[in-house]
Amino acid sequence: MQNSENTQNKILEAAKNEFFEKGFKGARMQAIADRASINKGLLHYYFKSKEKLFSKVFEESILIMWKELSLEFKEEQTFTDMLEQVIDKYLDTMKQNALLPKFIISEINEDPEIFIKRKELIVSTNMMQKLIKKHQESIEKGIIKPIPFLHIGMSIISLVSFPFLIKPLYKETIDKDEAEFAKFIEQRRTIIKSMIRNLIAI
């Protein structure tokens, strides 16, 4: 049982790396088997098709991302404080999973249904519900501008994700040094928080 679980985990890790780098269309089952150091027959024993393996990797990627982003908020926190906490956590998660935004965005563009079927994994989270509630309360109290929550969320996602999406271009045209990119991301952290504060401030 343990060996079976270990083999499946090896396959999923290998598949994640293959799909993250090449996407669904570019990934090959033989390449995944090679990465996992198993034969192709054993790979098909665990996952009958590339589609089923991809579906598992995609779903786990969303779950991992939202588990990493799962936050506990205090009742006395302002909406702005909560957003800054989200920005910190999101940036830290992206630093650990730099290929994740590219993978999810490219695959959603290829097949929107793959994400739509799993949207409840995100919308139903306790963290998201608390943010939406605090957002509405803050508007009603006149604390923030009545900007729709979706626009605020999209602004944070795009501001945080974009540097990771263009990381290869950044390193090719601006600075190849990984330490400099990390420093750039930390500068972004402060700038993004300032931009979001200014976006919603009365």
Image (cartoon, rainbow, N blue to C red):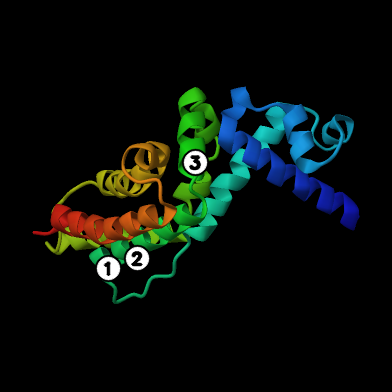
Q: Is residue 132 visible?
A: no
Determine the secondary structure under disc 2.
Answer: helix
On the picture, is 65 further left or further right than 134?
Answer: right
Residue 191: percent from left, percent from top: 22, 57
In terms of depth relative to the viewer, which is nearer, 5 or 167? 167
Please, what is the three-letter code of the amino acid marked with disc 2?
A: Gln
Residue at 52% of width from left, 30% of height from top?
107
The disc placed on residue 85 is: 2
Please, what is the three-letter code of the amino acid marked with disc 3?
A: Lys
On the picture, is 156 further left or further right than 52?
Answer: left
Residue 83: percent from left, percent from top: 30, 61
State the quadrant of the N terminus. bottom right
On the picture, is 139 further left or further right than 118?
Answer: left
Q: Is residue 3 visible?
A: yes
Residue 4 sits above or below residue 83 on the image: above
Determine the secondary structure under disc 3.
Answer: loop
